[in-house]
Image (cartoon, helix red, strand yellow):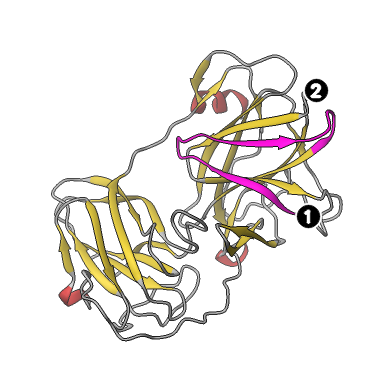
Amino acid sequence: MRYRLTFCLFVVLAGAAAAVDLGPQAPVKPVDSSAYVAPDEVRQGGDTIATAVPITSLGTWYGTTIGYADDYDESCPWSATAPDVVYALTPDVDLVVDIDLCHSDYDTKLYVWDENLNVVGCSDDFHYSAPCGAYTSKIESLALQAGITLYIIIDGYGSNAGNYQLDITEFAPCDLACPDGAQLENEPPLVDGYVDSYNSGCGNLGTPVFQPITAQVFCGIAGWYLGDGGSQYRDTDWFHVVVPSGGQLVIVGDAEFATYMYELAPQDCATMDVVQYVTIGPCEESTLTIAGEPGSLVWLWIGSTTFSGPVYEYDYVLSLNLDGPVATDTETWSGVKALFR
């Protein structure tokens, strides 16, 4: 579902406070308190586009932005005055890549320009917790053309600078299958400017709307789109799930894009918080285990870890240990969607 209210909750992650956002727009960034420090090591990125360090193959590069000039900036969605460094990537063949700053030690920003200095990809916050560090960046599924140079600019939020790890890997597409007989979310397709109250949870104006999950396998749709005024909005889904007779609810989730799965409590929109969470996907399962009285209700929230770029829709699958029949047989999720839309 999409909604116009933003919830900014906080949860302690790996010993440090990090923002957990349940809303459809980018979370509020913390006040920039970083200090400018003179460089104490040689960084691997170039100072400007004219001196960009060439990348000739996929792999990992290390360096620092500390002490270098603020030559460039791109808003996604925050502007910055941080120092930046540049790499030039000219592939020999057409390919699709992920560009990742996981394991960097500061609040990063990452963007890619084409030869005419037009932005083709931008990420401020993608990772929010260990092992990647809070507020580090990643651009997924960026298409490259053979012989065409792109400039990768490593920047920071505000005036933040630090040491980075740049990983460029070939994108591995993830295509999940939905078991025949699974419960389907049946939410309408995402389109720019679309507004609805489908499983809108605490974001619904008036009475909160939750979708019950009653089957042992559930197939849903998530993603993002452009909303009012050209702002980026994401689809977030809110669910009710009943704890089974054994007193322990186990949810195994996977998604075609990195996605958060939260347990929320207390069950009051004004006071709720994130009790626990896991990140599911892409094509990587994670398990959320919830203890409770048999028959009691659980609040579950599903939403993408980040959301930027053109409208994008992807699929996720949940397996639950509910009392009842188990779905069998698999076919492509695209085929399943075609039957119900």
Q: Decide if residue 135 is on the left or right side of residue 302.
A: left
Q: Secondary structure at mark 2?
A: loop
Q: Position of residue 317 (x, y in %)?
A: 57, 31
> Image point 20% across, 45% down: which residue?
94
Question: Nearest the camera: 159 or 139?
Answer: 159
Q: Amino acid at mark 2?
A: Ser
**Residue 240 or residue 10, whichever sits in front:** 10
Examine the image and state in which quarter residue 26 appears. Answer: bottom right
Q: Specify start and end residues of the magenta stretch as a single range.
A: 273-297
Q: Is residue 288 magenta?
A: yes
Mark 2, other Cα within 10 Å: few <14 / some 14–19 / many ≥20: some
Which residue carries the number 1 mark? 272
Does the stretch in magenta take in 122? no
The picture places residue 121, in percent across and down from the top left corner, at: 37, 60
* Number of marks: 2
Secondary structure under the numbered disc 1 in the rendered image: loop
Q: Amino acid at mark 1?
A: Met
Q: Which label belongs to residue 261? A: none
Name above or below for residue 239 compared with residue 207: above
* Percent x, y of residue 52: 18, 71
Q: Residue at x 33, y 83 (%)?
A: 70
Q: Residue furthest front?
A: 15
